[in-house]
């Protein structure tokens, strides 16, 4: 039961602690990194760790496959509509989409865990 509670609290703790660290170390003054950029990495790590704890199977390969498919679709859409490729713009947009997909998968994992 403690693991299930930790899984549910983990993203909330991330969204509280990461902005505090940003403010304490004054990261925004010398960097363009935002809070969701850092939280994404921790959420991916949390997806892997907690899926291994609960199901003994890592969700990470499936997540990476999903993110790769999303990257290909975004690349083709970018090339189809804009007719050129800007790596910086693509990576920024892709990383934000990755954040939302990761957060959605994490929330789904928490809902599934507490439903069973």
Image (cartoon, helix red, strand yellow):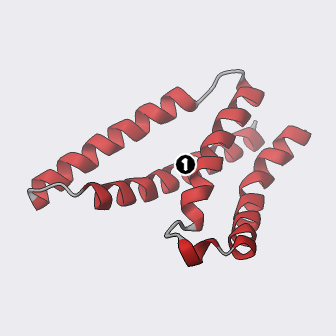
Depicted 58 relative to depicted 39: above or below: above
Q: Height in image: 81 above or below 69?
A: below
Name the side, left or right, on which 93 lies relative to 79: right
- For numbered disc 1, what is the local secondary structure? helix
> Percent position (x, y) of residue 55?
71, 25
Q: Report x, y in % for residue 15.
A: 70, 64
| x and y, in percent, of residue 17 in the image | 76, 64
Which residue occupies the extreme right position in the image? 2
4 shown above or below 39: above
Say which residue appears at 49% left-offset and 29% top-offset.
Answer: 62
Task: Identify which residue is drawn at 30% across, 62% down.
Answer: 89
Q: Is residue 14 left or right of residue 81?
A: right
Q: Nearer the viewer, residue 45 or 103?
A: 45
> In this view of the protein, which residue sits in the foreground, 47 or 19?
19
Q: Residue at x 54, y 48 (%)?
A: 102
- Relative horizontal placement of residue 22, taking residue 6 as reference (left or right): left
Q: Residue furthest top?
A: 56
Image quarter of the N terminus = top right
Dividing the picture into quadrants, the one containing residue 78 is bottom left
| Quadrant placement of the C terminus | top right
- Judged from this view, the residue extending furthest toward the front is 30
Q: Residue 92 lies in what quarter of the image?
A: bottom left
Residue 14 screen position, x and y as percent: 72, 59
For image coordinates 57% across by 52% down, the residue present is 40
Taking depth in this image into account, of 43 and 24 the one nearest to the observer is 24
Q: Residues within 10 Å of mark 1 (few under 14, many from 20)?
A: many
Tag 1 residue: 102
Number of numbered discs overlaid on the protein picture: 1
Residue sitting farthest toward the left: 83
């Amino acid at each position: 039961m403690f693991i299930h509670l930790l899984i549910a609290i983990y993203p909330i703790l991330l969204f509280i602690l990461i902005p505090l660290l940003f403010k304490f170390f004054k990261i925004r003054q010398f960097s363009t990194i935002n809070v969701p950029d850092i939280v994404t990495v921790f959420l991916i790590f949390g997806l892997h760790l907690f899926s291994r704890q609960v199901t003994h199977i890592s969700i990470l390969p499936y997540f990476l496959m999903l993110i790769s498919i999303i990257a290909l679709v975004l690349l083709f859409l970018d090339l189809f509509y804009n007719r050129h490729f800007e790596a910086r713009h693509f990576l920024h947009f892709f990383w934000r989409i990755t954040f939302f997909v990761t957060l959605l998968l994490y929330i789904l994992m928490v809902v599934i865990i507490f439903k069973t």
